[in-house]
Image: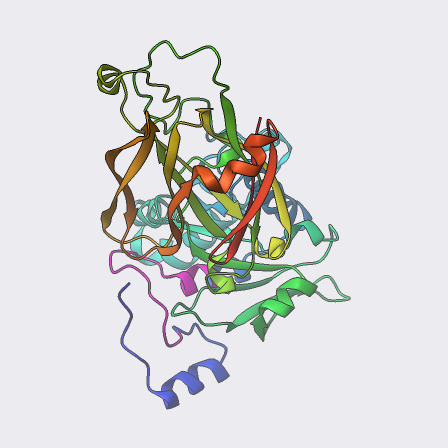
Amino acid sequence: MNAKKLLSLGLLLSLFASCEEVDVIGEYPAEDRLFSLSDVAKILSDLPLEAEHLAEVHDAVSSSSGNGYDEEYLLHDLFHAPGAGVGDGGQATKAANYQNPLRDLFADYLARHYGTKAGAADVETYLNALSESDMQIYWPFSEEWDGRSYPIVTFDPGFGAESNYGYEIRIDQHGAHVVDSVLVTEQVAMERPVWVINSNDDAAFTPLELFKEGDGTKAGKTTTPPKDEKEFILSIRDFKMLRNYDSWFSGASEFFVKIGAVDGFKATKDDDLKNYSPSLTDFMIVVKRSQVNRKVPFNAVLLTNFTQQMEKVAFMVIEDDGGTTTSWKCSAVVKYNSKQYGFELEIPYKDKDDVVWRGQLTRNFFNEVLEKGGGTLTGRFGDVEITFGLE
């Protein structure tokens, strides 16, 4: 990502001391944005927030979380579907309950601060710039909210920073809206509500919770198998992340689990080989920061017809960080009549992704469970632990 020019230390300190808007060292807004992440944080802290606005954001991030995404509220949804979470398809179930949604506060703010100089048409341009951006409100640990406390508003400063300044919003004893500058860390976010303005990077993907049968899977041709060979369903039962992969400002870790195999392979003669081709199953698992070192239960089917003739399956786990699409060239290996046959395939990923683990799961890895006729087994793959099920 591209960074802004570094501000001199003296200028940075003078701006911060005067409580004016500050672009801290390391922030990386896209060059084509009319508003930076820090701009939106400052605007949001200046809005006359009331209890229903806190509830609106909480409704949205809770819905996103329930759909398998991070605790996030896209600005696009804020303007077009108040209260809708990622994965709701732009439909908010509680939209009718918001008498004065956040989008109206933004519109009033921009009209006051930009309308007299730029006119109504340009105010609409600013509103569109916000609503069509990739920015969002990220609310870590939102499940701990007490339903009353006002947030600290901050933004992702970039470059792996673990602290930043933020705007503490509170209502004083006279009912006045008060904003103070405070230092924000992840520990602070664990103890009180913090809204982080950052960039969305997972809305375009389908998480496991919304994964429909057939999505991401390319099924190969099949043939009539021998009736005496048992087939198993290979699945992930639970997933444990042993460390967080990114700065807490960036949000949860998005893992992509990819498996390439000749699903249902049961050849009895050489001619059967032409009836098979490898399949690829690929889906996203979002692990929130609060779930580190905890087993997160899933019921994710990797292969629908795992057989003992499948000697090796290609397996890859990555943590998404974007970049240019590349691929891992690998093979899925099958065996019959004491001979092994490899089917070549390419598994795509991005060159900036953290490759958590890639390699081959052999039939020997599953032998103990296969001999029992099914069950579960757990393995460590880099900094994640995965429990598989065969049934």
Q: Tell me if I can see residue 342 in this picture.
A: yes
In the displayed structure, 187 sits above or below 224; it is below
Residue 379 lies, in percent from the top left, at 54, 49
Q: Tell me if I can see residue 84 in this picture.
A: no
Residue 142 lies, in percent from the top left, at 64, 52
Residue 339 lies, in percent from the top left, at 29, 31
Task: Identify which residue is drawn at 49% across, 84% down.
Answer: 17
Q: Is residue 225 left or right of residue 375?
A: left
Q: Is residue 322 left or right of residue 228?
A: left
Segment colored magenta: 24-41
Residue 152 lies, in percent from the top left, at 60, 64
Residue 29 on the magenta segment? yes
Count of picture labels: 0
Residue 91 on the magenta segment? no
Quarter of the image where one finds residue 222: top left
Q: Is residue 233 left or right of residue 342?
A: right
